[in-house]
Image (cartoon, rainbow, N blue to C red):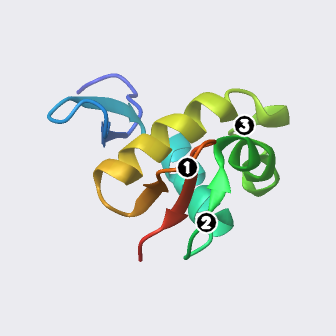
Amino acid sequence: MAANRAVVVEVENVNHPGRVKHLQADLYEAMKRALLKILPKTSPGLTVEDIQERVVAHLPEKLFPAGHKAGWWAKTVQLDLEAKGIIAREKTKPLRLHKTR
């Protein structure tokens, strides 16, 4: 029997189609829930900076103590959700994101 292994999830990247990474599922799912909770359904959406600031309040402290690594996970999950068509970016500067569903 294999050693105690973490459950993983396949993560895509809208900027690198066809490439998949395997990441820790509990951290991914927590960030996904937080992102989808804060992102609006319509344009103009939120900037990446707004997302980084707001998402921490919706993350479990046990998984993201004091927001540790939340920025990296927010960007990674953002790119995956874009690749899956769940969120979309506006062609604005700065970049803004919103839910598609």
Q: Is 92 left or right of 52, judged from the image as shown? A: left
- Residue at the left extreme, as displayed: 18
Q: Residue at x 20, y 29 (%)?
A: 19
- Residue at the top extreme, as displayed: 3
Disc 2 from disc 1: Cα separation: 9 Å
The kind of residue on which mark 1 rests is Thr
> Which residue is the site of mark 3?
64
In the displayed structure, would residue 39 be above or below residue 94? below
Q: Residue at x 75, y 57 (%)?
A: 58
Instruction: Give the label, 3 or 2, closer to the camera.
Output: 2
Q: Residue at x 75, y 49 (%)?
A: 50
Question: Label 2 neighbourhood size at 10 Å, few (<14), some (14-19), many (20+)?
Answer: some
Find out whether the residues at labels 2 and 1 contact each other: C-beta distance under 8 Å.
yes
The kind of residue on which mark 3 rests is Phe
Q: Secondary structure at mark 1?
A: loop
Q: Secondary structure at mark 3?
A: loop
Disc 1 from disc 3: Cα separation: 30 Å
Q: Nearer the viewer, residue 39 or 67?
A: 39
Q: Is 82 left or right of 68, judged from the image as shown? A: left
Q: Residue at x 57, y 64 (%)?
A: 36
Q: Quadrant where the N terminus lies?
A: top left
Q: Secondary structure at mark 2?
A: loop
Q: Which numbered marker is on residue 84?
A: none
> Which residue is the site of mark 1?
92
The kind of residue on which mark 2 rests is Pro
Q: Is 21 left or right of 101, judged from the image as shown? A: left
> Which residue is the site of mark 2?
44
